[in-house]
Image (spheres, rainbow, N blue to C red):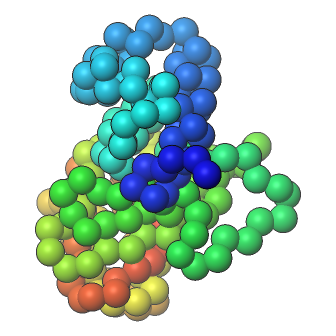
Amino acid sequence: MSPTASDGAPLDVIATSLRRERARTGLSLTEVAKRAGIAKSTLSQLESGTGNPSVETIWALCVALDIPFSRVVEPERPRVQVIRSGSGPTVFAEHADYACTLLSSCPPGARRDVYLIRAEPGKPRLSDPHTSGIVEHIVLSAGRAKVGPREEPVELLPGDYICYPGDVPHIFEALEPGTYGVEIAEYT
């Protein structure tokens, strides 16, 4: 069994993806680390399959490499795909009780990823801006949450939908236990 990032995405998948994407861009380890605002040693560890990256670190690397989050955490999958509840590549927030599970990455010809978001009351998930032009769509499935741009979050109830720019600081704050929803990240 392969080691995982907090029992989620396999570290070997993250390592392989980061090496592939950095090579694709032609950027040095130093340059990618600088753009992501992380230590060069941290990126080196991640590319070698060690370390324990948080969702914030992976997002920062995706912004630095100008790629969707899914391209780093998702292994290749068969054409027909079923992800059972409680499984799938999951990454956890560093400062909030928040988990993001990739359900479907962007297929060729499309520019979107689909995630299951789970959060509990406490510290909110404060997200820095993602790649330029990204739009986030969320349908809340259970619980209650404040979601959207940090300056104007909106309270959502089950079945509510929100769409907002993901390239500005934004928030997901669970207001009830067992809060979860589906997020679609759309890359323009």
Q: Is residue 5 above or below residue 34?
A: below
Residue at screen point 34% across, 87% down: 178
Number of numbered discs visible in the structure rendering: 0
Q: Quadrant of the C terminus?
A: top right
Is residue 140 visible in the rendered image? The answer is: yes
Residue at screen point 31% across, 20% down: 41
Location of residue 120 by image quarter: bottom left
| Residue 74 in the image, given as x and y percentages of width and height | 61, 48
Residue at screen point 84% across, 65% down: 80
| Residue 68 in the image, given as x and y percentages of width and height | 53, 42
Residue at screen point 21% across, 84% down: 175
Location of residue 158 by image quarter: bottom left
| Residue 10 in the image, given as x and y percentages of width and height | 55, 47
Camera-side residue of 105 and 148: 105
Q: Is residue 8 above or below residue 70?
A: below
Relative placement, left or right, of 121 versus 27 is: left
The outermost residue toward the front is 1
Camera-side residue of 91 and 161: 91
Relative placement, left or right, of 81 versus 98 is: right
Is residue 132 visible in the rendered image? The answer is: no
Q: Is residue 113 above or below residue 41?
A: below
| Residue 174 in the image, given as x and y percentages of width and height | 25, 78
